[in-house]
Structure formats: C-alpha cells, structure tokens
Amino acid sequence: MRRFTGAMTALFFALLCLLPAVALAAPVPQILGFKQKVMKETDGTPYLHCEIGLSAAPQYTVKGGGLLHPKRLLIDLTETSLGDLDSEIGLKGKKFAQQLESVEAGAHTYLTFTTVSPVEDGSYRVTIAEGKDKSQLKLKAPVILMVDIFDGPYKPVDRVNGVKDRVIILDPGHGGLDTGAIGPDGLMEKDVTLAVSLKLRDILVASGASVTMTREDDRDVFPGGAQTDGQELQARVDVGAAVPDADIFVSVHCDAFTSPKANGTGTFYYPKTWQDAALAQALQDGMVARGGRRDRGIKEARFYVVRYSDMPAALVELAFITNYIEQAMLADDEFQRNLALGIAEGMSDFFAARR
Ligand SMILES: [Zn+2]
C-alpha cells in the first residue's frame, strides 16, 4: 500500500509537471495565403505592400542588405509551416522587388524578397497584425505579416500647420549659367538653393499649401537666358505676379563674403508693406531655431525680387557658402531638410500672426 501511494504520488507530480507544457504549447503557425498591391503613402510615395496570412503569430527575425547580399530582404519565421505557398512568386510594380522565394527548412520557413534597390534603413517595413479584418487586401487569416518595400529609403515629408490653402511663391536663387557664389570646395549656391527650395515645396504641399516655383531645375528663369541681371530678376518677379492671390514671395539664397570667417543665417526684406519685416522675422526665427546657426537678424535691402514683388516678400540667406563649416552643412541633406522645415514653420507663424 505504501509503495502504491508512493508510485501514485510520483505519477501525480509527473503529470503536474507535464500539464503546463501541454497547455502552453502554441499551435504551429502555418502560412495560409499571400496577396500584394502597389500602394501609396499619404504624401504620394509608392511602395509594394505584401501580406502573408498566417494561422497564428510566428516568432520572426528580419535580415536585410549588407555587403554580400545588398538586395535581399530575408524574413526567418521560426516554427512555421510553409503551407501551400508557391516557392516563387513574381512581384508587382517592378521597381520595388522582383520576386519572393519561400523555403521550409527544419523548423524554419525563410521568405526572401529580391529587391531592386539595396536594402537599408527606411527602405522596408515588416509588421504583424493580429485579429480579423486587419488585412488591407481582404486576405482571410487570423494573423497578417505585412512587408512593405520602397524603391529606396523612405523619409516621410514633414508637415506644418497653418499654411493650408495659402498661395506661396518660392524662388530658388540663381540657376543655369548663373552659379551664384561658389564655396571653397566648389559647392555652387544655385544647387543648394534649389535643393532646399524643393524640400520646402514638398513640406508646404504636404501641408496643404499651393506652391509655385520660379524654377524647379537648373536653369535661367528668363527664357533662353537673360542679357542682363535685371531681365532675369524681373522674370522671377513675373512668375509671382502671374499667380492670382499669391500670399508671399520667398527667395532662397546662400550668403558669401571675402573672409571665410563670416558665418550665420540672415534674412533681407524691403519695407514696401508693414508685413515684409514681419515675414522676414518669422522666417529668420524659423531658420535659426531649426538650423542652429548664428542669428544675424533681419535687414532692409533693395534687392530686386523683394522690392518689386507686390506681395510681402523676403530673401533668406541660409548660411555662408564661403565658410568651410557652413559649406559642408549646406551640402548636407539633413541640414537642408532642417532649414526647409524652419522656413515652413516661419511661414506658419507669419500666417498665424496675420489672421
Ligand atoms: Zn544669391
């Protein structure tokens, strides 16, 4: 009897130990289906959206890029069954990824996307959504693994408040035959002013403003190239004058000086209305806040485009292209983005104060 009790006790504890293991063993996730569609971000950026339907949530790791396989995005699903997913699937859109290969090996299923652009930070997104109706493509599965592939790193465009429905004229300084000032390492002002203006345009358009640019590429604004500076500058003023209800005119430049020590951010205006100085100050504050360079303040000047534009106008000098440090900053994508955001925020403040 005692021996029997001992055996029963041992059996009882053995069962007790086994029970939680049995109860906790999750079902093996199985792939149930695949759908794909080329979609667009709210700012219009296209991407390939892929959905892999699963019976349960898998453990997974994502590996992408690197020197050996720069155009490979690998998703390693642990303890997952491939189901009847095709081993090779051609992908839509052509410019995002070519194909998806799937293979089950041991306890793993490997999904390999062959991308068109190198895989790097921001060029893809992998997320998992649990629950019915999470699919954006009407894929029926309790769990959806979503893989989004862009044609390069995707950086969402910044937005600002208070510029919706405003009409803004942007004038990237110089262009074409006129390089503007040239930095010690050869950086040309006309390239910086265009790069910052295009980024500024994207922010403003994403924020609901209407934007007209005097130029969107590297060229003279006066058709065929002007004979005089006056002709070229009047051509820029004319672009703004032709836009009905234009609220403001902003010309983008880099400063330059004979001494390489000169540095900082400044803004010029011509006081033809009481609003010109207010606009200049708002843009100046925005640029200094985001760009972090020395505040040279706002100054009156008889620059042609700010003087002869009918609407409130300002000419911003982002930083000194003739200064080694600021030249390097002006060539930097992130600094350009910050300055563009600062100018957009300045416009937002200007419109808010005028309301
Ligand atoms: Zn200039």
Image: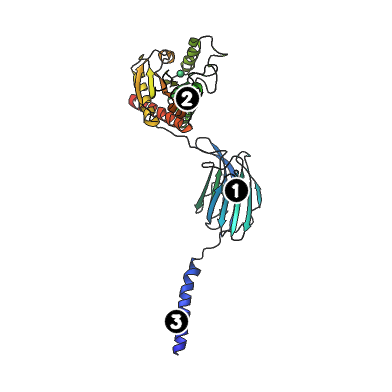
Question: Is there CB contact under 8 Å for labels 1 and 3?
Answer: no
**Disc 3 residue type?**
Thr
Q: Position of residue 172 (x, y in %)?
A: 48, 21
Residue identifier under label 3: 9
Q: Secondary structure at mark 3?
A: helix
Residue identifier under label 2: 211
Residue identifier under label 1: 35
Q: Is mark 2 within 8 Å of ligand 1?
A: no
Can you tell which of label 3 and label 2 is closer to the viewer? 3
Q: Quadrant of the C terminus?
A: top left
The residue carrying pointer 2 sits among few (fewer than 14), some (14 to 19) or many (20 or more) residues within 10 Å by Cα, namely: some
The residue carrying pointer 1 sits among few (fewer than 14), some (14 to 19) or many (20 or more) residues within 10 Å by Cα, namely: some
118 with respect to 281 (left or right): right
**Disc 2 residue type?**
Val
The residue at the point 42 percent across, 12 percent down is 308
CA separation in Å, label 2 and label 1: 38 Å
